[in-house]
Every structure is written in C-alpha cells, then in structure tokens.
Image: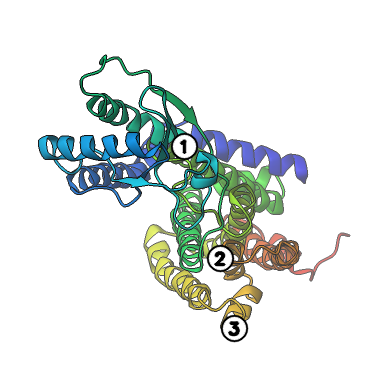
Amino acid sequence: MIRSAWVIARRDYVATVFSRTFLLFLIGPLMPLLFAALFGALAAGDAGGREAQPIAVTMQAGDARALIQADARLTARLGPQWLAPLDIVSPPAAPARLLSDPDDAPAAVLSGSLARPLLTAPRAQLKRLEGPAALLIAEARAGEPPAVNLATHAIRPPATAASGPQRLGIARGGQLVLFVLTMILAGMLISNLVEEKSSKVIEVLAAAVPVDAIFAGKLAGMLAVSLTGIAAWGGTAGLAAWIFLPHDAMPAPAVGWPMFIALGISYFVTVYLLLGALYLGIGAQAASVREVQTLSMPLTMAQLLVFGLASAGVARPDSGIAIAAAIIPWSSPFAMIARAAQEPALWPHPIALAWQLACLAAVIAVSARLFRLTVLSSGRLTHRRRLQPLGFLRRG
C-alpha cells in the first residue's frame, strides 16, 4: 500500500513540477506582488516632507548649535526632504539606549564631536543616512578642513512586541495568505483527477495498484507540489523583503516570526489535506469538465463561508464564534493562525493540530470510500468487483 502510494505520488509530482506550465504557474502569483512593490516604491519616492523619525544629536552645545544652523542652510538650498529633522538630546545619552526606546526611537544618533563624529543607526538606516550626515557635518565645519572622518556603527535594536492593532493586522494577513494559497492550490486536485478519468488513465492505475493507494498517492503528491510552489513564492518574497525592507520594519507576532512561520506551514498542510481529501472524494463523482465547473461553485462558496467564520472571531479571540471556528476542522487552521499572531501561548496549537489530524483521518476514510466506489464503477468492471468494496461479498 505505502509503496504503491509512493509511486503514484512521485508520478504526479514529477509530471506536474517538471513541466513548462508549472513554471508559468509559479510566475503568475508573483506578478501582482511585483507590481505592488513597484507602485509602493513610486509612492514612497513621491511622498515629500521630512521623515517622522528624527536624528538624535548628543554632541556638546556648541557643536549641536552648529549642526542646527548647517541643517537650516542645507534645507534652504536642497529642500526639506534631504534629511530627517534633528533632535537635540540633553543631557546626552548612550546611542544604544536611545535606539532601543520602544515608544520614541530616533532614526539614528549622531554623537561624538564635529572633529570626530559618530553615526549610530540600524544597518538599513545607516546606509541611507551616512551620506547626508557627512554633508551636514561638512557644512557645520565651514572654514575648517573639508575632510570629514565620519565613523559609523550599525546596531540592531531589540525586537519589540507588536501593539494590539498591529497583531490584529498580522492575524488577518496570516488568514488571508493561508486562504489564498489553499484556494489556488487545492483546486488542482479536481482538475488533475478529471483529466485522468476522461483519458481512462485512472482505470489503468486502478488495475495496477490498490484504489486506496491512488487516493493517498494523489493527495501526497499534490501536497508536495503545493509545498514546492510555496517554497518558491516564499523564498522570493523573503529575499525581496530582506533587500528592500528594513529588518526591523515588520512588527513581530505574539509567538515570534520563526514559530509563526512554522505554525503557518503546519496549518497549511492540515487545511490542504482536509480540503484535498474532500475535493478528491467529491470531485471523483464528476465525469466531465462541465460537472467539475458545476461542483466548483458550492465548494468555493463553502470555502468563503469557512474563511468568513474564522475572520469573524479575530477581533475577539475568546468569543463563542472564535471558539467555534477553532473547533470546526476546516476553519480551525485559519482561526489558530490568527491566535498565534495575537497570543503568545503555544499550548493550544498542539491540541488544535492533533484535533485537525483526527478529523483528517475521518475525512480521508469517508472520501477514500467515495473515491473507491467511483473509480471502481468508472471502468468496465464486473458487478462482483463493484460490490466488493461494500463488504457484501467475501473471498471464496
């Protein structure tokens, strides 16, 4: 059984992934992200005005006054958007302590003296502010040698917990990503099954391996295909975020990003298998593409209802509707990924995953029976062969 399921899974995986159409399938969802990043960059470039986060100055009073005067002269010549506003800190404080302030952290800290200045900032800010800061110090040192030895120090401020609205946004974003991925990838199971039924391939497979192995193999193979697509999309998105976004720009969920991503993958696997088993069991009843289109509408509406139920309890994780969404197997992954973004407790997640896997076993048992009956009755099989899965006939 396991060996046969492995053969079917490997066959479906290789036939799907090693094809030109799969490459186009991978590129498709990346195009909207590319356009969104492009328009976001253009909007950020067109947004004038000085930044909200100032540059803290912890120099002596004379040097700080010279910097303020130089900043006024440069702003008059270059415009108000050339550098973040300056904020004189008195009495001077350590740059690390200023940058670690969770409520009012500056963009950078300019310390030392005009003769030996030091710019301290997160690495992503440091690359952007080093040039303007050197120009500001050169302007403040007017009449002195123009060479500026600006020392820089990259610091990584400690991660701060996201606020309530930020965690709510992460929860809804996690639910949306999980829903979109399942909508895109789970429907591939029905189309793959109908294609093989219409070309009689499923009958050849049923004659060679057990029907339950076909069901398990197709489910495992398409899950591997989906995880391959998610790895490609996630890797591209992570690389883009690493290059273009500041490392501390994204607030962390309650359980932290590593655990949140691990839970997201786990919940995707469970919701994909739950939906995939249901799709295979119901989709096996369709004999043509037209029947698949007829079945797609109620399945899509059911998914939207499940997603709506899980989304309704995000704002109140302890409400009755949120608990109901966490119990219903098809909405439980969406509800629990939102809980991971809002609450730091980890103990509910093993319980939820165990419950989802138990429900998955029941769904697979029922769906495999429907799948077996449909496949066995799809070919030119004898009446005795069709009745065997029902248990009415015994060997001998």
| Residue 330 versus residue 16 in the image, above or below | below
Q: Quadrant of residue 342?
A: bottom right
Task: Please name the residue shown 18% across and 40% down the image.
Answer: 72
x and y, in percent, of residue 146 in the image? 25, 16
Q: How is the image coloured?
A: rainbow
The number of numbered discs placed on residues in the rendered structure image is 3
Query: Distance between the Cα atoms at labels 2 and 1?
Result: 30 Å
Q: Which residue is mark 3?
A: 319
Checking the image for residue 338, the label placed there is 2
Name the residue at the left extreme.
Answer: 77
- Badge 1 density bin: few <14, some 14–19, many ≥20, Cα 10 Å: some
The tag earlier along the polypeptide, 1 or 3, is: 1
Question: Is 88 on the left-hand or right-hand side of 1?
Answer: left
x and y, in percent, of residue 163 in the image? 51, 64
Pointer 1 and pointer 3: residues touching (CB < 8 Å)? Answer: no
- At label 2, the amino acid type is Ala
Task: Please name the residue shown 26% across and 40% down the image.
Answer: 68
Checking the image for residue 97, the label placed there is none
Given this view, does label 2 or label 1 mark the residue nearer the observer?
1
Q: Secondary structure at mark 3?
A: loop
Question: Is 105 on the left-hand or right-hand side of 394?
Answer: left
Q: Which residue is mark 1?
A: 122
- At label 3, the amino acid type is Ser
